[in-house]
Image (cartoon, rainbow, N blue to C red):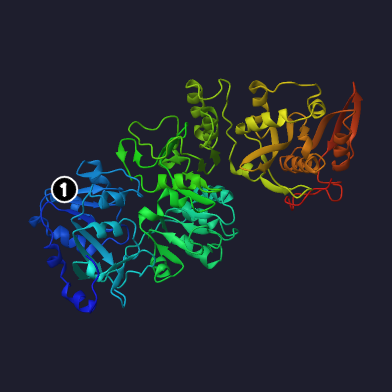
Amino acid sequence: MSTSGGNWQERFHRKLRSPAQAMAMIGRGQRVFIGSGAAEPQILVKALAARSGHLADNQIVHIMTLGIAPYVEPQLNEGFRHNAFFIGPNVREAVAEGRADYTPIFLSELPRLFREGRVPIDVALIQVSPPDEHGYCSYGVSVDVVKAGAECARLVIAQVNRHMPRTLGDSFIHVDQIHALVEGDEAILESSHGSPDQVAQRIGRHIADLVEDGSTLQMGIGTIPDAVLACLGDKKDLGIHTEMFSDGVIDLVEQGVITGRRKSLHAGKIVASFVMGSRRLYDFVDNNPRIEFHPSEYTNDPFRIAQNDRMVAINSALEVDLTGQVCADSLGEYFYSGIGGQVDFVRGAARSQGGKAIIALPSTAQGGRQSRIVVNLKPGAGVVTSRGDVHYIVTEFGVAYLHGKTMRERALALIHIAHPDFREALMAEARQRSLVYPDQVAVLGVGTLELEDLECDWQCKNGTPLKVRPIKPTDEEMMRELFYSLSPETVYHRFFSGVQRMPHRVLKDFVTVDYRRSLALVAVAQNGEREEIIGVGRYAVDMAANQAEVAFLVRDDWQKQGLGTYLLQRLIEVARSRGIVEFTADVLADNTVMMHLFHANAPSPIRSKLRDGVYQLQFAIGLHDVPAGSETATNPVESAPA
């Protein structure tokens, strides 16, 4: 129906109906679309259920709605059959019991089902804002698939609610495109959840570390998205292009963190298809020119998403198997939610210049009794994001990057972001399936808070920033690359012989440490999209003597940058905190650089013996007699002395 000129106000009043009168326009056997999320027209839904005795075999279709769903009640089965394109809590039981249907589909493609007539819409029940001076009503907090549903319906019935925000963008329908209007003012449905717990906060910090200044974000609703947003306060010029957002975005906008200035698509604008949250959120989006609402076929189009440089997509999962398959819509055979926009944004972010596709999930479920990182998905579980699509997986224990990785590398990485209580069992099953080396072991300390506290940033003399952190079993390939990049002289000084090979059986002992009796800190440099280990400092504790033997290795092209000095000082600091009182080291007599390192930075006089061309060094690391300028604990980001 096209808009007409003249007095639209008069036509508006001619179309006004009571809820019962409007529902009387619906016939038996018709397919009825219901508006989404917080924009569900509850007055119309109640009136539809009340007319069930006059209806039969009416199919009800929608994505998730926040409000009531009386049409799935058993007593109304003869009148209605629901088909969910995304399963919400209000219809989950009906789908599970077979009283309602579920159609899995990418949210970006759902509007095409309506527009091409594959799922023809007879009636659309929607909720809109009052018309403006030109007769245009806004779809308000849910444009998503509502716009397509209304535009394809033969009959459009709208609840006009003065509490519905007037959202801007591609979000309007004219009064002349609506067949019946029901005035009904009621509070817009709100969605709330608890504050992020420690698990969500740790996941949020890991994800925030992946977000660069100028990134454009997609995220959903819940404690993990809120935790991520809470950790982004130090970022600059972030943007939003998302399926939906909630209250957490508001604070970052007000703080000047979300500006959209560096967006490569819709610069300066927050782009979304719907919102769910509190009244504060609805007031924030009301008539706000900074925010553009677009339908799902636009916001969720992977090709359009990819036009946002540095696109960061953050989505959730129910479980992930050791090969990288992501289940996000079902608990085994039990359909829980839906595909939604996860794959749309995973693929869009993956194709974005500098983009990152992230799947985030707590490491456990059922109060810690069940691991979400599993050897195999539950029987009947659906794969939403495939092995080929997956990039980053994040739990509270760290980040596993899987794209382009072998099955062995994937399994090893995922096991070490699983909860420590389940790692040994996961590793045993992975060995049995030949997913990892037969001698691979699980290291329980990886990703714990104690080790996170040892991570820090440091800047070397040439100004290059490095990340210094404890070594992990997943560092084996980078350690292999480090070894084969060394000069023969550096190899000889570190290993006291001209070692020619560094196979797994040797490397595994370098990367597998218990972090108590032995510790290794690695310095990691970013080389484009790749990380490289360019230096290692380690110690091994003699428990009986309460002393530790130390050793260092720095790649030739990174020597003379102060890295060896810094690693020594960091190891001294950590060892002191753990009650170790003395360091020892063996140094070849002709290794003058290493001899200078120890003599210039040891916190106490060095005792040494020369035997067979090797100096055996020994020095106390107590808090006394620390040389001036050698303390780095108070500001680990500063460059250490030469």
Nearer to us in this view, 190 or 44: 44
**Mark 1 = which residue?**
74
Total numbered badges shown on the rendered structure: 1
In the rendered image, the quadrant that contains the C terminus is top right
Q: Residue at x 34, y 31 (%)?
A: 379
What amino acid is at disc 1?
A: Pro
The answer, for residue 345, to whether it is visible in the render is yes
**Residue 430, above or below 583:** above
Count neighbours of disc 1 (C-alpha within 10 A) and say few if under 14, some if 14 to 19, many if 20 or more. Answer: few
Q: Is residue 54 left or right of residue 250?
A: left
Q: Residue at x 16, y 48 (%)?
A: 74
Identify the secondary structure beneath mark 1: helix
In the rendered image, the quadrant that contains the N terminus is bottom left
**Residue 176, above or below 152:** below
Residue reaching furthest to the left:
54
**Residue 445, above or below 488:** below
